[in-house]
Amino acid sequence: MQIGYETGDRVLADGHLFEVVELRRNRWGGQSARLASVDGTAAPRWLTPRLDRARSSVVDRRALHAMVHGFYARVRADESLGPIFESRLHARWDEHLERMVCFWSSALLDERSFVGEPMAKHRALADATPIHFVRWLEHFHAQLGETFAAAVGPSIARRALMMARGLSTGMFGAPFDALVPCS
């Protein structure tokens, strides 16, 4: 089964942000998408949608959906992180997951679909400690490896690390990796 695109979808490929501007049937009977660079810095290109369950070589909303849902399944099962999230979300997990898809789509695809104050939400977590950021990143990196091709994951991992450092500094006065020895 192929994962398709719609006109207007955004895709991050090879370090450039593209928008789907045209859809056509390809010679294999599937649909391909013509991509145009959002900022004009990259040449237009065609993209044939990936197969479902294959690691994505591009960052698109569908891959981010898979990443977020897989990541939070790990978080919920984690004995130290799970209770922190569960105590705040209870029956609102679906809402949280959709907000996180919007968050990552805004952060990586410039969708501007997320509205919120992450720092205020994280500062309210009185039971969170710097070690929780280490656990969070461990699960995040593991999920990146399952969702994205090897060439794609590191750029997302760098973005997540910068975010974790910023949140930790706002919460504890220093980046988590300055407070917790990381291996």
Image (spheres, grey):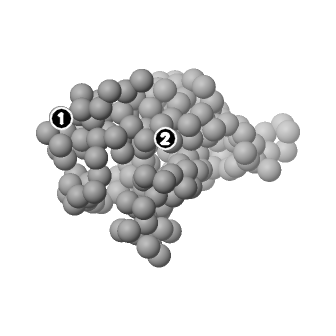
Considering the numbered disc 2 on the image, is that residue within a helix, a strand or a loop?
Answer: helix
Mark nearest the camera among 1 and 2 is: 1
Is the C terminus in the top left, top right, bottom left or bottom right quadrant? top left
Determine which residue is flagged by label 2. Answer: 140
Q: Residue at 18%, 43% (x, y): give it.
A: 172
* Residue 164 falls left or right of residue 60: left
Q: Look at label 2 and name its amino acid.
A: Phe
Q: Residue at 55%, 55% (x, y): give it.
A: 77
Residue 176, can we see it?
yes
Considering the numbered disc 1 on the image, is that residue within a helix, a strand or a loop?
Answer: loop
Q: Quadrant of residue 85?
A: bottom left
Residue 165 placement (x, y as % from top left): 27, 35
- From the viewer's side, name the closer residue of 10 and 169: 169
Residue 151 placement (x, y as % from top left): 57, 23
Q: Look at label 1 and name its amino acid.
A: Ala
Categorize mark 2 by other alpha carbons within 10 Å: few (<14), some (14-19), many (20+): many
Determine which residue is flagged by label 1. Answer: 174
Q: Earlier in the sequence, mark 1 or mark 2?
A: 2
Residue 162 placement (x, y as % from top left): 31, 33
> Answer yes or no: do the residues labelled 1 and 2 have beta carbons within 8 Å?
no
Report, in whole angstroms, how far the alpha carbon at label 1 lies from the one at label 2. 21 Å
* Residue 164 falls left or right of residue 54: left
Q: Residue furthest bottom?
A: 91
